[in-house]
Image: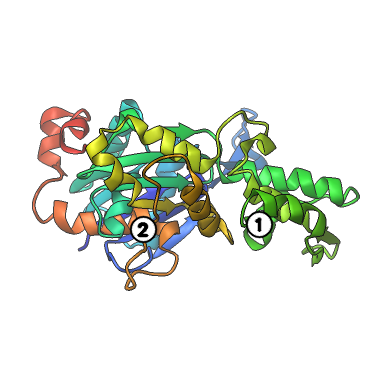
Amino acid sequence: MEAVVVDAGSKLLKAGFASPDQDPALIMPTKMNRVLEDDDGGDSSMVVEEVTVDPVVRGFIRDWDAMEDLLRHVLYTDLGWEVGDEGQILFAEPLFTPKAIREQLVQLMFETFNVSGFYASEQAVLSLYAVGRISGCTVDIGHGKIDIAPVCEGAVQHIASKRFQIGGIELTNLLAQQLQKSNPLVKIDISEVERLKEQYARCAEDQGSFEERLNTCQIETHTLPDGQTITIGRESYIVGEALFQPYILGLEEYGIVEQLVRSISSVSSENLRQLLENTMLCGGTTSMTGFEERFQKEANLCSSSIRPSLIKPPEYMPENLSRNSAWMGGAILAKVVFPQNQHITKGDYDETGPAIVHKKCF
């Protein structure tokens, strides 16, 4: 049985048996519905309400009970594991994952799920593996965070890495605010705003084009599922521009390209060119219409003597590689670490305990 690869993000969980040149077999919301009951002391409990729980917040596991329930469903129901015959598993880890979370995850896998082998690797490293690189720099714009991570010879340079506690959810909220201004009589559910963002959000060619489009862009009419209609125009460009001009979000930060250049300026000069010239965009937000072209245009204009250049993915990889690159890189790595016995075994865990993850997964 092939190893299972799991990449659990704030919005989506991706899982499947390791098949490096394919999309993950399972892509599902990282959410759980929890039923709250009112125990009045009698023989039965009454269901009061059902609430939605987010096991992963800003990339990190926050609700372990919900995560356990979610993984149990994924592994046994969706992927077909059988109790007593569990296989090996590899997790994609977010940048700057705390030691306590790493230890709790490996403990959960061995003590609750009884896996036969475990490995974990950082998302930035895995994303580069997916495009055949061991060195480069990833710009990962996820649902709950933006991570910039230089990688040299398969190791993340944490001193030069940077995380921002903003992501796709902030852009969704921004779009909701903008639509409320232009459609004050219509109340739009946030989940519908998320879908509108994926359909309409785009980036202007440059800052000048953005300012021009604020006044001249075409107004489109969209019918909501409940039959109400709204108009969408300049809002679609404002969402994309926020990544290059964060003041739109109320933040005193540099734009995404300048952040990249500044973040890795502390890397040794002999590695700087290799990193910048192998820049990779990851995360669902980077597939926004016009984002890649705007990123490269800003990169060509930046003040650095060595300018960022985007990696072109291999032709044999799926089109939506940027969305699933960490999972695909994990599938590649799983084909190496488990056959070559570089993973954590049950014996390793029993002998050392959860701290073994820091010795074998780095």
Q: Is residue 85 visible?
A: no
Which residue is painted at 75% across and 56% down in the image?
Answer: 213
Dot 1 amino acid type: Ala
Task: Determine which residue is flagged by label 1.
Answer: 201
Q: Which mark is residue 178?
A: none
Depth check: give the residue in front, 14 or 275.
275
Label 2 – label 1 distance at C-alpha: 23 Å
Depth check: give the residue in front, 80 or 122.
122
Which residue is painted at 85% across and 50% down in the image?
Answer: 182
Which residue is painted at 41% across and 56% down in the image?
Answer: 14
Which residue is painted at 22% across and 47% down in the image?
Answer: 115
Quarter holding the C terminus?
A: top left
Residue at the extreme bottom: 316
| Relative side of 171 to 21, left or right | right
Q: Position of residue 156 (x, y in %)?
A: 28, 38
| Relative side of 173 to 95, left or right | right
Judge the density around disc 1: few (<14), some (14-19), many (≥20) Cα neighbours within 10 Å: many
Q: Position of residue 180 (x, y in %)?
A: 82, 46
